[in-house]
Amino acid sequence: MKLALCDDEMSCLIKLSSYLKEYFLKYPQLNITISRFSHGEELLKDIYKNGEYDLYFLDILMPGMNGISLGLELRSHGFTGSIIYLTSSPEFAIDSYRVRAYDYLLKPLNSSALFSTLDVLLPSLIHKKGDFTIVKTKESSVKILLEQIMYAQLSNRIIHYHLRNGTIVRSLYLRSSFTEAVSDLLTDPSFLLCGAGIVVNLSTITRLENGNAVFFDNYIVPLGTTSFRTLKTAWVDYCINKENL
């Protein structure tokens, strides 16, 4: 489970890291990594290169990109990791709802408030991390988290899984139907079969234009007319339903 801490005050980063390490001592079965960033631009650069985090702790008042703008940027690119805001100013509480933040904790941070929030949030994070598919390749069997898949496409009887970090995982030669092979994906409401040989993760799409699906970091995938029409209808419905959650 990947955690990102973003705050321009080093003392806050150190204290929060210490609290989190203390908390997760109760869960030795979880593989926890904590990454610290001093400003929003640095965090975004890391995400675009290495993929998103499961949980973000974001300061609101930072030089350059503030925490609210950073959260909106994450959501606009389809990143669904939970966000907890940390700030000494309660006036930003309403703004945090625009980002669909999980919680809003006031500084100076105390461990009891943090631990109470994590006690409620953690079960959903663990459940989310359990959503994956196993892809058999020439070299081995690869476990892929569903949230990391932008889309999977059939080409020459091989399924190409395109991931958020830019890598492509290629399956063995397909001997079953494409729908059967990607059944793990299709059980997740975020995935849509929008053509005979392509399934798309709706949560990773940032916009649709000129017959193309545009994913985060302006990754463009051209679609046929029928597939584009199917995807457009489903994506709009998906976005509306997510906003109403």
Image: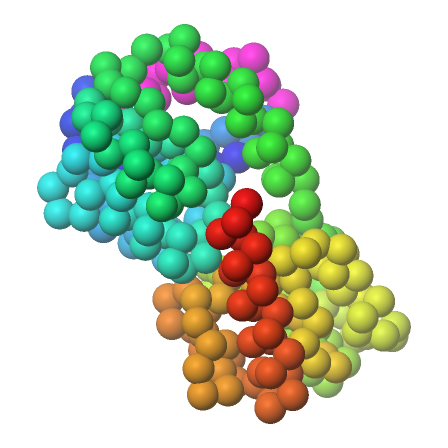
Please indicate whether residue 52 sits to the left or right of residue 139 in the image: left
Residue 193 shows up from this direction: yes
> 177 above or below 240?
below
Image-based side of 157 in relation to 90, left or right: right
Specify the segment rendered in magenta.
13-29
Q: In this view, does 170 lie above or below 221?
A: above
Q: In this view, does 245 lie to the left or right of 11?
A: right
**Could you tell me residue 4's position as x and y percent?**
37, 36
- Left or right: 88 in relation to 181: left
As drawn, the residue found furthest toward the left would be: 63
> At 33% from the left edge and 51% from the top edge, which residue is drawn?
72
Q: Position of residue 137 (x, y in %)?
A: 72, 64
Residue 162 in view, yes or no: no
Please state which of residues 195 and 105 is positioned toward the viewer in this rendering.
Answer: 105
Question: Residue 99: horizontal and vertical position, in percent?
Answer: 37, 45
Decide: is 191 above or below 34: below
Q: Name the residue at 63% across, 23% down.
A: 29
Picture coordinates of residue 229, whole percent (x, y)? 60, 83
Say which quadrant the C terminus sits in: top right
Farthest-out residue, right: 176
Q: Is residue 82 above or below residue 213?
A: above
Residue 26 covered by magenta stretch: yes
Q: Place residue 218 in its image quadrant.
A: bottom left
Q: In which quarter of the image is residue 113?
A: top left
Q: Is residue 5 magenta?
A: no
Kindly identify the residue that appears in the image at 47 percent across and 43 percent down: 81
Residue at 54% of width from left, 68% of height from top? 236
